[in-house]
Image: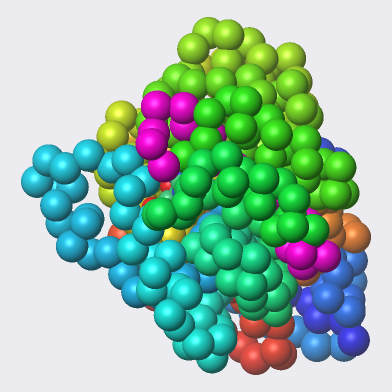
Amino acid sequence: MSTLVTGIAELVTNDPDRGAGPLRTIADAALVVDDGVVAWTGSRGAAPDADARIDVGGRAVVPGFVDSHAHLVFAGDRAAEFEARMTGAAYDGGGIAATVAATRAASDEQLRAALAALVAEMRAQGTTTVEVKSGYGLTVADEVRCLRLAGEVTPETTFLGAHVVPPGADRADYLALVTGPMLAACAPYARWIDVFCEPGSPHAFDGDEARAVLEAGRAAGLGLRVHANQLTAGPGVRLAVELGAASADHCTHLTGADVDALAGGSTVATLLPGVEFSTRSPYPDARRLLAAGVPVALATDCNPGSCFTSSMAFCVALAVREMHMTPAEAVEAATAGGAAALRRTDVGHLRPGARADLAVIDAPSYRHLAYRPGVPLVRTLDLDPVVISKRN
Ligand code: NIG
Ligand code: FE
C-alpha cells in the first residue's frame, strides 16, 4: 500500500539529488511511502497519487534519528552517583559495577520490560534506529542473555564484554574469557564488538588489551566500535582507525594525531555530548573534527551512569549550543552520521529506496530542535492514514 504524506513545511532529505542547502531540504514538500520504503519526494504540487494520505499540518519532517550508541539492557539506576558528580565527584566508570550487580540479579522479564520502555521512549522522540550494547552482564551467561534481549528490539547489537574488568576478577583471566569463550558464545547474537579503551582507568582496558579484544572480535566476524578517548587522550581513537572500526565513540580528548588519523581513515567520530553534560566534562572539539573533514555522528550513549538521556533532540541542542555545530550539522550527524557509524545505507536519509523512517517536528523547521531546547517537539510519524491536526 502507498501513502502520500503532505503538509510538510520543510522536508530534510539528506539526498544529494534533491532539495537545497546542507540537508537538501524541500519547502512545501510531499513524500510517498510504498510498503515501508520511500518511493518519491518532491514539492507538493508535483506529488503523484497514492492509496492513502496523511497531512502533517505544516510541520517539518526529518529522517528518523539514528542513535548509534546506547546501553539499554540494564537494571537499577545511579541517580545518587549523578547527584554526587554534580557537586564535584569525577566520573571514572567505577559505578558500572553497581549496574552489573543489579543487572545480574534481574529476571529476563524485568530486563525485557525496562529495555522495551527505553526503546519506546526513544521512538516517541523520533529515534527509529538504535544500537544496543551488552556490557552489564560480564559473565558468559549474562552477556549472552543481554544480547539475546537486545536482538529482540534491534539488529544493531554490540558485544561489550570488555566494558570493565568485573569486580573480583583477575584482569588477565577476564581478558582471556572475553576474547575466548565469552566471545564465542556472544558472537551469534551480535553484529558488533566494542571495548572501553581507557588506559588510565583501573576499570577499563589499555591499548594492547583493546587491540586483543577487537582483533578477536574481527576474527569472529564482528564489526568494530571503540569507546575511545573519553577520559583522557589515550590510544583508542588511533587504534579504531588503524583497525578500520566503523566508529570511535566519545572523542572527548583528542590530539592532533588523533584528528589526523580520523581524517585519513574510514572511521566515524561519534560524539556523545549528553555524557559531557551529565559528567560535567569539557565537550569534544567538534569544529576541529569538521574542519578536518572527519565524518561526525551524534548519539545519546543512553546508560544509567554517564548519561541517562534517550533524547536525540537534546543531543542536537547540546551539539549546537556547546559544540558550536550549526543546526544543520547537528541534524545531519544525528541522522546520516549515525547511519554511517552503523554502516547502514537504508536509514539516515529520505532518498527513494530508503526505509520510510520519518520523524515529524511540531515546528516549521528542523532548526527548532536546537532553538527550542527541552521542548518535546519531535516524534516518530506513524504511517496510519489519519489526519494530524494543523499547527496553530
Ligand atoms: O559510554 N565509558 C563507558 N561506558 C559508558 C558508561 C557506562 C556506565 O557508566 O554505566 C559510557 O559512558
Ligand atoms: Fe557508551
Q: Nearer the viewer, residue 318 or 177?
A: 177
Q: Residue at x 54, y 91 (%)?
A: 109
Residue 362 visible in the shown view: no
Q: Nearer the viewer, residue 277 or 71?
A: 71
Q: Residue at x 57, y 40 (%)?
A: 172
Q: Nearer the viewer, residue 212 or 242?
A: 212
Magenta-drawn segment: 185-203
Q: Which quarter of the image is occupied by the C terminus? A: bottom left
Residue 320 pos. (x, y %)? 40, 38
Residue 158 pos. (x, y %)? 67, 56
Q: Residue at x 75, y 51 (%)?
A: 180
Residue 221 visible in the shown view: yes
Residue 190 included in the magenta stretch of the image: yes
Q: Residue at x 41, y 54 (%)?
A: 168
Residue 329 pos. (x, y %)? 55, 36
Query: As drawn, which residue projects farthest toward the left?
Result: 87
